[in-house]
Image (cartoon, rainbow, N blue to C red):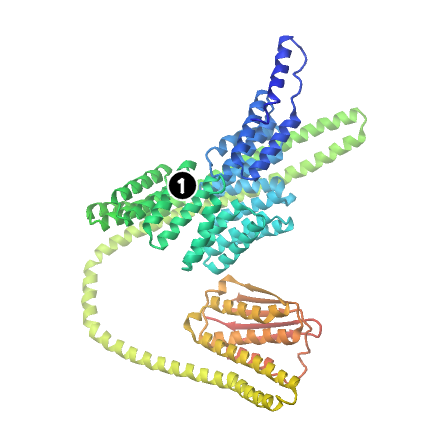
Amino acid sequence: MKLLSPKIPLLILALSFCQASFCQRKIPPIDTVFIRHSLDQATLLFKKSLYDTAINICNDVLRLTEKHNLKLFSATAYDILADIMLTNGKLAGIRKYDSIILTTAVHFKDTNLIINARTREGVYLLEQGKNGEAADNFLYVLDLRLEKEQSIKTAEVYSNMATVYMALSKHNEAMKWFFKTLRLYEKHNHHAGLGETYSNISSLYYLIGRPNDAIEFQKKSIYFREKQNDIQGLIIPQINIGQLYILKDSFSLALDHLKKAVTYSEKINNTKLRAAAYSGMATYYVKAKEFGNALQWQNKSIALFEETDNKVMLSRLYVAAGNLANATNDSVGAVAFFQKGLALSKQLDNKENIGNAYEKMSTFYFSHKDFENAYRYYKIYTTYRDTIATASALTNIEKIKIEYDSEKKDNEILKMVTEQRIKELQIEKQKALIAGNMLEAQKKENEIELLSKAKELQELKIKQQDEELEKQLLLAKNNEQQLQLAAQDKQLQQKQLRNSTLVRNFILGSVLLLAALGYFLFNRYQLRRKIKEQEALLAVRNNIAKDLHDEIGSTLTSIKILSEVSKKNLQHDQAKTSSFLQKITEQSAAVQQGISDIVWAVKPENDKLENMVIRMREYAAQTLESKNVHTVINIDEEVLSKSLDMNQRRDLFLVFKEAVNNIAKYAGATTVQVTLEKINTGLQMQIVDDGCGFDIDKQTSSSGLKNMQARAASLNGKLAIYSLPGKGTSISLRLPTT
């Protein structure tokens, strides 16, 4: 208000003077420099999270610009207000502003405003679960200018596209978009964007079941946020890392991060983030089984989400609060929360949330021994459970139809705009020819040619999109038919089940007759299995004894000899004694590492390759980082779930260990790349360094390469070593897996 008050009276006085004197001239132009300055100031205040002041300035500008019909300035003010509402999670009002902004932006051909409005529309649709329509908006603004521009705004839209794929559970695609975002933010040295993207990548790692990686990326996010002193940006990473520590049962660390999130959220004026922080605290106390505290935090979170009218979140939180109220013996409060959650879910027509509410209500009444209501609600829940899959398929079909029509309409509009522009350029060319301006005429001709080619490409794109969308529609219809067939098949199975009652009774009698024979055979099977287990245990013991003798016994002998020599030289040659003591230290560490490797290989919980990868990372870091060797380990996600037996993982790790040791001792490398990937039905490990290399045909006294070949043979694998002096070394091991 205060910014505009000195200007407004003068403007009103000038307008009144013109009317009183029946002046036929135009109204004098108002101070547009002042308006621009006010809008810039509002933008700056918004970035500093001073939302109320920014809103007041925008409203003052709107009163002035709308009075004088300055539509483009009005649209800019609405653009700032829409960004403020988006940041605070007040999505309902955004569309009203964006409809005004788009009309003006299209009229004035203001690309920036179009990009902002369409991006916010995409975010709104994403929040509503309309992922396909959201993606259309994001791809539209990328095609419009952002893909070519590669700006900070481009990175924001890349991040939104990654979020779309996360919502569709397409984690690989989401990861690609997030890393595109990361590279672009790194290019621009944009720390706030890096912090946000690291947090998003962390969430993705959590979804694919890799909490340790998720924690590391959240730590990176927090580092960049703290570097910028970005209090608002720190809230979500603190909540997320707190939730991750809860999963790992590290409750003290979790509580520390969640308390920080609450402290930060209460310092800023952002209702959405405060609600998220309170909800995170509620989750902590649920896990800690302090249900009274959990309900208090949940109620505070619900109050804030009610303030922002976030119906989707509230429909879930009400049901969760019902469970907490029940846990604190507040039956009346529990029923009230369940009813509110159910009513809101029905209002949103969210069948999954409706089914969830009925299931929790059934459980509640069952725990209170009200079996009639428990059974009634359970029957309703099963109805929703069985129809969700079919409803989801029908929704997908409808969504594809909407996307098809919407995209076709957008393309037609673009085509019409192109045709109109070609006509305008042809008129301008004629005017230039008449005026004798051949250079301008040639310029217009070139523009006409470019637009004509663009139009041809556009028509080709429309045709390709039509074909692709029709194909998707046919696939969706096929899926619907398959669901219908599945439902019919289910009914047929139920009928057959009823008819098979007599057969089942007959089979039951036969089973009882065969029970005695089965018992006898089972006992024999158990006896044979015990014998095999004892044989396997004996083999394990023999292998451990062999490893202890081969790998550790010789080292201990060497340590004993070195100790005796050191003792003899202690008084005579201090330098030589120091050298021997250093060797004893190194060999002791090697013994310790060898015992650790044997123990690790024996443990059955290390069967999964995921644990092997962790140990490989640790060993590479310990061995190579101290020598300033940059190590990159690329792991194919498909191999993480594979299992290796004790001997396999021992030999595979020892091949890796020998290769890393050779690099550390002899290669003089600066970079090492380790790749573990699936090849057909087998597994391939490749270790490449940029070191000095060696002549593989030259005979050496070292037995390291021979040991690697022997271990590869014991794995039924193939070991290939490629190296030339000065050209680095590549070691590739292929082995079959089950």
Kind of residue at badge 1 = Val
Query: Can residue 168 be seen from the camera position used here?
Result: no
**Does residue 344 appear to the left or right of 715 in the view shown?**
left
Q: Residue at x 46, y 72 (%)?
A: 644
User: In this figure, which residue is indicated by the disc labeled 1?
Assistant: 312
Residue 530 x, y percent position in the rendering? 32, 80
Query: Can residue 315 be seen from the camera position used here?
Result: yes
SS type, badge 1: helix
Residue 17 x, y percent position in the rendering? 64, 11
Closer to the camera in the image, 494 or 62: 62
Above or below residue 671? Residue 182 is above
Quadrant the N terminus occupies: top right
**Residue at the extreme front:** 571
Q: Residue at x 26, y 50 (%)?
A: 363
Closer to the camera in the image, 236 or 202: 236
**Does residue 738 appear to the left or right of 194 in the view shown?**
left
Above or below residue 314? Residue 424 is above
Residue 430 x, y percent position in the rendering? 75, 26
**Does residue 723 appear to the left or right of 232 in the view shown?**
right
Q: Label 1: how many residues lie within 10 Å, few (<14), some (14-19) or many (20+)? A: some
Q: Residue at x 47, y 54 (%)?
A: 241
**Residue at the extreme bottom:** 568
Quadrant the C terminus occupies: bottom left
Numbered marks: total = 1
Residue 454 x, y percent position in the rendering? 65, 39
